[in-house]
Image: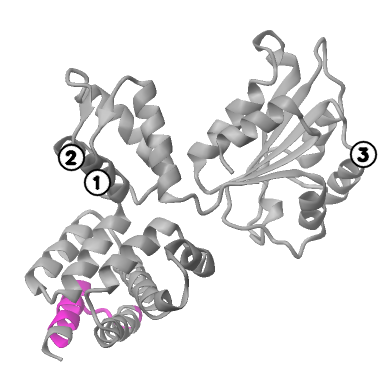
């Protein structure tokens, strides 16, 4: 299922209620534009509306959705960030009458497309409103988009702009952005300007312009730790600290990465492929791919030793005022010498 599937469906057979779910904000924006294009430009002021559910009461949006189209055939009402569909409990400025939504879903306005754009990994399926919405809505779930799909979207955008990209550059772009489509598309804008004359995006261009994500930097740090390259690991740790990263956050990311390496190392022989394992672990397929490549080089004993050392480091970070860089250095010394 992809954006083209959504576009084809809403164009050929529009339905009264839609749920579009994805953590990739780029895909949600594409979906928004697809729904907006259902309304002729001259009619959009009257028949297209978008509401931020952090700011607007649900009943106001539902009243709009229940209104028949003005001087047109259809109406599109989009609800953004419907956090009431999740298990989050943060206090919101807006008030949401979920009973009103349940009533609307029983008899939705047939000439309105009410669209829920949900930028969340998962919804709280225990809630009555979520159960009802999943039953009544046409659902497009873009979760766990594959690396192949990401490459296709990138190549399509590059081709539409009249550029080309070599495979090495494409791999580096995905790696440095942690396969985040929203960030990738932002970085492509810079690359188009940088490579305007040649119309070819190369790996050196990506290396010069695209900054490594925190996750990618942590992955480099993990690699240095496992290779027992103390000097490299300490340099990377210092650079992250100099860039304002908090020790507790960095250690949590390191623990998470080693936990994933252990899971992949232990479970990969028991599943058919990386995609199935990504679904089982509920993580992005690209992360499983990188973890699988890295875990092959190390034993379960080495991975476990590093994980336990980082777990002990986390306890020290939370219970002592000692310098975090010194604690990390002690962790490296213990890991290398054991």
Q: Using a 10 Å C-alpha cutoff, classify the residue at mark 3 as few (fewer than 14 neighbours), some (14 to 19) or many (20 or more).
A: few
39 lies above or below 99: above
Q: Quadrant of residue 9?
A: top right
Q: Real-space Cα distance between discs 3 and 1?
A: 50 Å
Question: In the rendered structure, does residue 322 fall within the stretch colored magenta?
Answer: yes
Q: Using a 10 Å C-alpha cutoff, classify the residue at mark 1 as few (fewer than 14 neighbours), some (14 to 19) or many (20 or more).
A: some
Residue 132 as seen in the image, left or right of residue 234: right
Q: Where is residue 324 shown, x and y percent of the image?
A: 22, 73
Find out whether the residues at labels 3 and 2 contact each other: C-beta distance under 8 Å.
Answer: no
Q: Quadrant of residue 53?
A: top right
**Residue identifier under label 2:** 203
Q: Where is residue 89 shown, x and y percent of the image?
A: 66, 61
Disc sitting over residue 172 in the figure: 1
**Residue identifier under label 3:** 107
Question: In the rendered structure, does residue 169 fall within the stretch colored magenta?
Answer: no
Q: Real-space Cα distance between discs 2 and 1?
A: 7 Å
Residue at horizontal 43%, vertical 58%?
A: 285
Q: Secondary structure at mark 1?
A: helix
102 lies above or below 41: below
Residue 198 as seen in the image, left or right of residue 15: left
Question: Which residue is outermost to the front?
Answer: 272
Which portion, as a residue range, is magenta?
318-334
Q: Earlier in the sequence, mark 2 or mark 1?
A: 1
Residue at horizontal 20%, vertical 24%?
A: 195
């Amino acid at each position: 299922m992809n954006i083209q599937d959504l576009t084809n469906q809403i164009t050929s057979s529009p339905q009264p209620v839609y749920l579009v779910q994805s953590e990739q904000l780029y895909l949600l924006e594409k979906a928004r534009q697809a729904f907006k294009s259902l309304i002729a430009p001259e009619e959009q002021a009257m028949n297209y509306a978008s509401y931020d559910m952090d700011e607007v009461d649900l009943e106001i949006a539902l009243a709009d959705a229940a209104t028949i189209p003005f001087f047109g055939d259809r109406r599109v009402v989009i609800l953004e960030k419907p956090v009431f569909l999740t298990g989050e409990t943060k206090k919101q400025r807006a008030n949401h009458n979920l009973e009103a939504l349940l009533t609307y879903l029983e008899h939705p306005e047939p000439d309105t497309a009410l669209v829920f754009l949900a930028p969340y990994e998962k919804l709280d399926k225990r809630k009555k409103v979520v159960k009802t919405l999943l039953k009544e809505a046409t659902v497009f779930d873009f979760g766990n988009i594959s690396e192949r799909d990401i490459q296709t979207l990138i190549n399509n955008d590059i081709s539409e702009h009249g550029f080309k990209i070599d495979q090495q550059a494409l791999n580096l772009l995905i790696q440095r952005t942690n396969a985040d489509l929203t960030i990738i598309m932002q970085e492509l804008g810079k690359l188009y300007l940088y490579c305007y004359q040649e119309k070819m995006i190369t790996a050196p261009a990506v290396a010069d312009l695209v900054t490594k994500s925190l996750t990618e930097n942590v992955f480099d740090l993990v690699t240095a730790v496992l290779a027992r390259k103390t000097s490299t690991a300490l340099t990377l740790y210092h650079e992250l600290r100099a860039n304002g990263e908090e020790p507790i956050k960095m250690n949590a990311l390191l623990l998470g990465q080693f936990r994933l390496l252990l899971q992949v190392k232990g479970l990969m022989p028991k599943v058919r492929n990386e995609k199935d394992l990504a679904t089982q672990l509920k993580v992005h397929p690209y992360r499983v791919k990188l973890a699988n490549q890295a875990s092959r080089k190390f034993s379960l004993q080495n991975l476990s030793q590093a994980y336990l050392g980082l777990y002990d480091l986390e306890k020290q970070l939370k219970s002592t005022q000692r310098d975090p860089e010194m604690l990390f250095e002690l962790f490296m010394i213990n890991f290398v010498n054991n």
